[in-house]
């Protein structure tokens, strides 16, 4: 039986993780790109950002998500795109966690910016699920980065 590390770092799995992560980020960017004011409102409800930063974040983050997602799907600048996605995911997890600890329910604005009407407990439960989803995407990003590291350290074949 193969060691788990060898199975996790198999190129077949790594390529699919990279592609899936790229698709997820490109899809997540779309509703934010189509409705920046609603995304800005979602960011405002986190109560973590200074007022002056809300609009720039609402305009830049979706484009960064789309660009990084497309780069992963196309297999271009994979390490840079995955590094940016990792930073974004860590930020998303931190922002959701802070608000969860405060018991301040927010709609994450991750894949939809539409307003919803749910109870506080339902929204807090959704935040827990959002954190789990983001941790899963962080695992995909880690797998992609490890694969990039493996490729960078692979010895060139003997051409003699």
Image (spheres, rainbow, N blue to C red):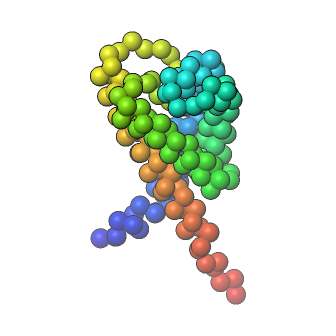
Residue at x 52%, y 32% (from the top left corner): 48
Q: How many marks?
A: 0
The quarter of the picture where residue 73 lies is: top right
Whether residue 76 appears in this view of the structure is yes
Which residue extends farthest bottom?
160
The quarter of the picture where residue 32 lies is: top right
Query: On the rendered structure, is 126 left or right of 13?
Result: left
Position of residue 87 relative to residue 110, above or below, is below
* Residue 12 spot, x, y in % from top left: 48, 57
Quarter of the image for the N terminus: give it.
Answer: bottom left
Quarter of the image for the C terminus: give it.
Answer: bottom right
Residue at x 51%, y 62% (from the top left corner): 146
Camera-side residue of 58 and 16: 58
Camera-side residue of 152 and 59: 59
* Residue 157 spot, x, y in % from top left: 63, 79
Residue at x 69%, y 83% (from the top left corner): 159
Residue at x 62%, y 56% (from the top left corner): 79
Position of residue 141 relative to residue 47, above or below, is below
* Residue 87 spot, x, y in % from top left: 56, 47
* Residue 45 spot, x, y in % from top left: 50, 22
Whether residue 16 appears in this view of the structure is no
Which residue extends farthest top?
117
């Amino acid at each position: 039986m193969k060691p788990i590390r060898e199975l996790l770092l198999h190129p077949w799995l790594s390529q699919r993780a990279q592609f899936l992560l790229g698709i997820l980020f490109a899809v997540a960017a779309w509703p934010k790109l189509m409705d920046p004011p609603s995304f800005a409102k979602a960011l405002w409800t986190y109560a973590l950002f200074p007022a002056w930063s809300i609009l720039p974040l609402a305009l830049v983050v979706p484009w960064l998500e789309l660009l990084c997602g497309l780069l992963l799907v196309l297999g271009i600048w994979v390490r840079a795109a995955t590094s940016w996605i990792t930073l974004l995911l860590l930020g998303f997890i931190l922002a959701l966690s802070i608000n969860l600890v405060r018991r301040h329910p927010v709609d994450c604005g991750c894949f939809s910016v539409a307003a919803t009407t749910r109870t506080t407990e339902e929204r807090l439960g959704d935040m827990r699920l959002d954190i789990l989803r983001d941790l899963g995407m962080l695992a995909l990003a880690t797998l992609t980065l490890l694969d990039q590291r493996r490729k960078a350290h692979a010895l060139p074949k003997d051409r003699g």
